[in-house]
Image (cartoon, rainbow, N blue to C red):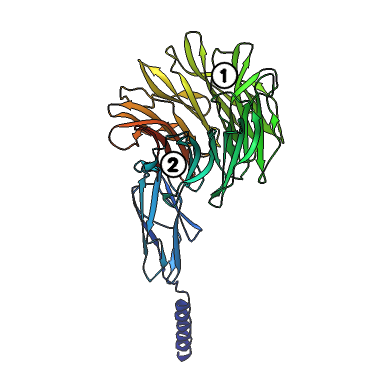
Amino acid sequence: MTVRLFVFASMLGILLLAGCGSQTPATYAVKVAASGIDGPVVLRNNATDTLTVPADGAYAFAKKLPDGAAYQVEVSERPFFRNCTLSGASGTIQAMDAEVDLACAAKVWAGAQELGDPGSAPGAWSHPVAAWPNGDAVVVWQQNQGGVYRLYARVFSGGSWGAAQQVAESSEGLGLPALATGSAGHALLVWYEEVGGQIELRWSKLSGGSWTLPAKLAGPLDVPGNAPPALDMNPNDQAVVAWSQNPGGGYRIYARRFTGGAWSSPVVIDDGTAQGIYPAVALAADGAALAAWQRFDAGQYYVSASRFQSGAWQGEEVVSGAFGSQTLPSVALNGNGRGLVAWWQVEPGATSVYVATYDGGWSSPELLGSDTSGQAAFPQAGLDDAGRGLVVWTQDQGGTRIVAYASYEDNWQVGPVLSPGTGGDAGPPSLAVDPSGHAVAVWVQATQVGDVVYTARFTQGSPDAPEVITAPGVVQAVDPQAALAATGDAVAVWWQDAGNKRIFASVLR
């Protein structure tokens, strides 16, 4: 009896000791209280644990943490045109659940800001704008001050515009600047300038916060009037420029590439059987390029294109039928080799907007819009990496010039009228598209308080309601241009005429 009791007591002691050794340490959750959610937000804790927040409410990361463990919550993905901020996002677990607040809100356009010198009565216009992937941006404008022609630039960074920097100056004349951005803080600018009575194509590079001294890129040139050079740049700091010049016997399309910090020799990219003017170019991240231009042949106009791949321009391809007046083509190219060209043309009794797409070969031209009043014009094209296309243009509807759009996924679909029914005419739109399928369009539209700037945001071909971004009051805005960053931030730039021309900008943040 005594032996059995001893054995029982020993076994009980062993079981109690084993039970004490198997106790699991307490763990605690990292909780999230979410508000303002309009589309899924993806959070990460300590760079590994992922939580998807689909709507307002309370959530928690799946992985719990022991007392004393550190946590660091970050926003990994969010709706493109929304800002999302975290409160209490980092700390140490202190014997209780951690509480993190997630608040999201739509990005908003800031009030219009004048970029020029208010006291100089500048007479400013011709204002290309471009954005870097991180949301910073740069704008360049042409200015005439007392018979001296200048190019100025300002950079938007850290939430504000930097001081104006003079890039070029000429007492003979300069203009038609083209601007493009590469990696963060890098940009290229090209323009025409009269030097010693002859026209040159000149260039400057932005790097380290400063512009290089202007240098000749081509010339002397015989260029067609009001035909600007075309320029594009990719995040790898490669670029391509195209221009029209007459070497004797007619206008040809020339191009140069910028790689490794240097320009290649100029090459002719048309076939020489007709005249070429009004080039447009697009450059993909892998260095592939697409150029399009207007071809004039035996009294008829066409749109032609050439692709750069495998280290060479592939030759001229006519992508349109014949038509009866000049046009300005717009091109887009994505990272998967798909491209598109949009243009407008005068036909018997109508003007029409067409598009052709490239996917291993050119499609036949497709009609997007047409009218009999001459208003179907000025298309702007964009393309994302998934192959979704977007084109915006002006067109007559019931006696009013409106902004129309069409989107492409498997085929082209013309959407409803983009511009609001103010009763006033709309001006030519500007379009910026990012690789994920988002876009911003801007245009001027006549209203009872003058010509104001409207904008609309697109997500994969579907626009939000348009909104006015000019300041309240009487406005005479002209020629707005748009740039869009991968962050969902955007910039719109235009000039206003109030006795002289002044440059204004609004930022979407």
Residue 96, visible in the rendered structure: yes
Q: Nearer the viewer, mark 1 or mark 2?
A: 2
Report the side of 139 relative to 227 (left or right).
left
Residue 411 drawn above or below residue 240: above
Residue 234, visible in the rendered structure: no
Residue 321: image quadrant is top right
Could you say whether the residue bearing mark 1 is in a helix, strand or loop?
loop
x and y, in percent, of residue 117 in the image: 40, 43
Residue 383 drawn above or below residue 106: above
Q: Amino acid at mark 2?
A: Ala
Q: Where's the N terminus, which quadrant?
A: bottom left
> How many angstroms separate mark 1 from mark 2 (CA)?
32 Å
Whichever of callouts 1 and 2 sits on the residue coming sooner in the sequence is 1
x and y, in percent, of residue 285 in the image: 61, 41
Q: Residues within 10 Å of mark 1 (few under 14, many from 20)?
A: some
The foreground one among 386 and 290 is 290
Q: Amino acid at mark 1?
A: Pro
Report the side of 393 relative to 272 (left or right).
left
Residue 470: image quadrant is top left
Q: Residue furthest bottom?
A: 2
Residue 298 drawn above or below residue 43: above
x and y, in percent, of residue 213 in the image: 59, 45
The foreground one among 285 and 347 is 347
Could you say whether the residue bearing mark 2 is in a helix, strand or loop?
strand
User: Residue 490 got which mark?
Assistant: 2
Say which residue label 1 marks: 365
